[in-house]
Amino acid sequence: MWPANRMSLSASLPTVVLPYPQPTDAAVSKRMQQNRRRDSRPEMALRSELHRRGLRFRVDHPVRAGGRLVRPDIVFTRARISVFVDGCFWHCCPEHGSKPRANTDYWGPKLARNVARDHVVDAALNDAGWVVIRAWEHELAPAVADRVERVYRQALHALGRSRCG
């Protein structure tokens, strides 16, 4: 589920090759290299909260949708629910996202492309019959888990099953 300020885009995006930015500071370079693709603290907190509630799921499970291979952070396969925990910087959070002051010619299009890709992925998953839940890294895990659990329980009810994973 997207916040109201995110607009959907067409499934076809032009491919833009961006120059690799040169590090302006060794500390910044090291910090960027330490960013994880999976198992971030917010993601781990959400997974722990969902597990504590008795919900079982797959982590980083590949899903084929619209000719693309997508790897949501959390997947409820039978219920067809995919959960993404988006980083505020990398996905341009309207509250906490920041615009880099260095290498703006690279970072502006790079971050915009990340957001556009998110829209395309959401559309592909929705078209393939998946429910997409997006959360920001700054959201508290119990609040996100409430949303996920509500959607999960609705999916169970629609499937007419008592358990689904």
Image (cartoon, helix red, strand yellow):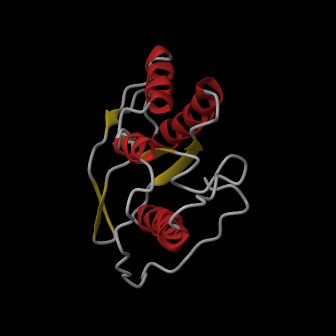
Give residue 110's position: percent from left, percent from top. 47, 68
Which residue is at a point 36% across and 82% down the rendered structure image? 15
Give residue 65's position: percent from left, percent from top. 33, 64
Give residue 24's position: percent from left, percent from top. 45, 56
Which residue is at a point 42% across and 67% down the rendered structure image? 124
Which residue is at a point 43% across and 60% down the rendered structure image? 129
Seen in the picture, residue 81 relative to 104 is either above or below; the reply is above
Q: Looking at the image, which residue sits at the far top? A: 52
Residue 91's quadrant in the figure?
bottom right
Which residue is at a point 52% across and 45% down the rendered structure image? 87
Viewed as shown, does residue 140 lie left or right of 122?
Answer: right
Seen in the picture, residue 93 relative to 38 is either above or below; the reply is below
Give residue 160's position: percent from left, percent from top. 46, 37
Q: Nearer the viewer, residue 66 or 70?
A: 70
Residue 44's quadrant in the figure?
top left
Quadrant where the C terminus is found in the figure: top left
Q: Nearer the viewer, residue 87 or 28?
A: 28
